[in-house]
Each structure stands twice: as C-alpha cells, then as structure tokens.
Amino acid sequence: MARVFISSVINAPAAEVWARVRDFNGLPTWHPRIAESTIEDALPSDQVGCVRNFRLQNGDQLRERLLGLSDYDMFYTYSILDSPMAVENYVSTLRLTPITDGNRTFAEWTAEFDCTPENEPELVNGVGQNVFQGGFDSLKRHFGG
C-alpha cells in the first residue's frame, strides 16, 4: 500500500483556514488545479456519503465520496470512486490543527492507496506535490504566508 503525507504551517487561525477548506464541493475556490465541481444528486456538500464530481484544469474528471467530516476536529476523509490515476482503494484525509503559538494552523493531508509497484513513486510524488502541497501553497498565499 502506498502512503502519502504532506504537512504545512499556514499563518492564519485554524478556524479561518477550516472555513475556507471545509466545503467538500469548494475545491475550485481554493485549489489552483481544480476547474469546477458539483455534488451529485443535489445532496448537501457536508453530508457523509455525498459524491463530488470535479474537473481538473487539464480536463481530467474525478469522482470522490465524503466518508467523514468533523467541524470539531477540523478534518474530512474521502475516497476516490473514479480517477484517471491508476489507483485503487484510495482514501485521503485533510486535517487542520491549531498552533497556539502564533495562532497559526498545522495542516496535514494524507492518502493511502493500492497501485502497481512501478507506478508508486510517480503517483506518491504527484499526489503529494501537485495535489496536497499545491493546495497548501495556495492556502498560504491566500492567507498571506
């Protein structure tokens, strides 16, 4: 099983960062690689089980299911249903933790998935750098970091 872990510090209070990333359908508002997103079947975007269907800037289409969301613990977990990536059993969590020293946010984004051994290095790097770190870099720019 492949594992990805990316973390960052965002110079803003965790509650403010959570307000920006919480919407499971809101990726296009904060992640530069996402062009558009919709929630299937007109379900609320914070309802566990809802499916987001989104398109990347390069035209690739993905579908992901929300598996868990906690406002108290500031995280959501989701799985990939359909993707152009050669992955199976993909589960990912985006989690925010307050840093009380300086009122900042520790952000971590993790994923585990199955893939062929020859594809693992490229997939781990692509998910980690292009998706997770790319999202964190965008949040840091937004919050002035």
Image: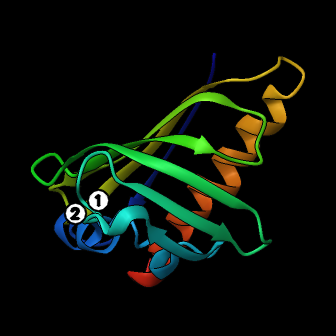
Q: Is residue 27 visible?
A: no
Residue sticking out furthest to the right: 118
- Of the image marks 1 and 2, the number of the one nearer the N terminus: 2
Tag on residue 78?
Answer: none
Where does the image place residue 91, in percent across and percent down from the top left?
49, 33
Q: Residue at x 79, y 27 (%)?
A: 120
Tell me how the rendering is colored: rainbow
Task: Name the amino acid type tagged 1.
Answer: Thr
Kind of residue sitting beneath label 2: Ala
**Label 2 sits on residue:** 14
Q: Is residue 107 left or right of residue 91?
A: left
The residue wearing badge 1 is: 105
The answer to whether residue 47 is left or right of residue 39 is left
Q: Please, is residue 18 above or below residue 88 in the view? A: below
Left or right of residue 74: residue 129:
right
Residue 42 x %, y %: 33, 69
